Image: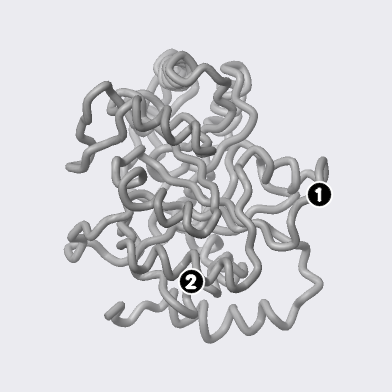
Amino acid sequence: MNGFRADRIATICLFHPLRRLTPGVAPRIPILMYHSISDLDESARRPYYRIATNARVFEAQLRFLRANGYQSIGLQEAVKVMEGAVPGPAKPVVLTFDDGYQDFCTEAFPILSRFGYSATVFLPTAYIGDTARTFNGLECLTWNQVRELQGAGVEFGSHTVSHPQLRTLPADGIREELRGSKQTIEEKLGCPVRSFSYPYAFPETDRPFKQTLRATLEEAGYQNGVSTILGTAGRRSDRFFLERLPVNSGDEGRFFGAKVEGAYDWLHGLQYAFKTVHSPRLGRVGGLNRHASSAQDPV
């Protein structure tokens, strides 16, 4: 049971019907944010902060997408579609996986393959080795698995080297995290890395930090990126900090469908307000805040 969730009730009962009454709204692309496809015990976490989606629910989500005409595309293609550079499918969806957990290979990929769906996986390279390493108590992919998945059509992007909250680092530290991860993946896979995923809560209200980060990403050779900003992505989205929809085992049935159709986007306003009120106002070194929470985005 999911229990009472105000965001769930509001999304299903209010914002989803309103969304369907406004068909003229400019089309947006749902970019789904997954982490682990497993039965990880997250009973101690509030539902919004959970990162695990069990295989049964994941399969049901893909079944919904297929039944409703959604076609998966890679993140790089999605950016081109949003910016009008290329035509896209009538109902595109992007599936992304953060942290490079091994269960992507053992659980997620077989299900994706059955539905003919693609995915983009973001790797924190310090936890990807020739043998399995552990991050957050879960085993991560090995480089052999990454190469096999790449050969099967999976896209890979950077999730930094050591998965820090970048806002806590000086400028040199940020450059090392962005360049080091990109260089390692490119050396291991023999292809350019163009996409980046920001670890932890994205400080979207800190404009100086965003400007510095965007410049550093461009300088390192990235072309696009995703964040934890809530919502679907559209033409006005920043290609380096694209909105995503967090997904876990609680996203079943009508709630998942409403999210994908844009009815969860309303929550971004509350997320932004929370960040504005609770944004740390501490001293800065090198133009960057030296302290920030490493928690996931609060509602």
Q: Residue at x 31, y 47 (%)?
A: 106
Q: Is residue 238 left or right of 248 when viewed as pictured? A: right
For the residues labelled 1 and 2, say whether their Cβ atoms are less than 8 Å apart.
no
**Quadrant in the picture for residue 207:** top right
**Callout 2 secondary element:** helix
* Residue 158, position as x, y percentages in the image: 46, 29
Residue closest to the eye, 228 or 37: 37
Three-letter amino acid code at the position of disc 2? Phe
Foreground pick, 93 / 250: 93
| Residue 167 appears in the rendering | no
Mark 1 — residue?
Answer: 87
The label shown at residue 256 is 2
Number of marks drawn: 2
The answer to whether residue 25 is left or right of residue 103 is right
Q: How is the image coloured?
A: one colour
Crowdedness of circle 1 by 10 Å Cα count: few (<14), some, many (20+)? few
Q: Secondary structure at mark 1?
A: loop
Can residue 172 be seen at all in this image of the molecule?
A: yes
Kindly identify the residue that appears in the image at 77 percent across and 68 percent down.
25
The x and y percentages for residue 160 are 41, 27
Viewport quadrant of the N terminus? bottom left
Cα–Cα gap, marks 1 and 2: 26 Å
Q: Position of residue 110 (x, y in %)?
A: 40, 52
* Amino acid type shown at disc 1: Pro
Name the residue: 58% across, 73% down.
67
Mark 2: few/some/many CA within 10 Å (<14, 14-19, 20+): many
Q: Quadrant of the C terminus?
A: bottom left
Which of pointers 1 and 2 lies earlier in the amino acid sequence? Answer: 1
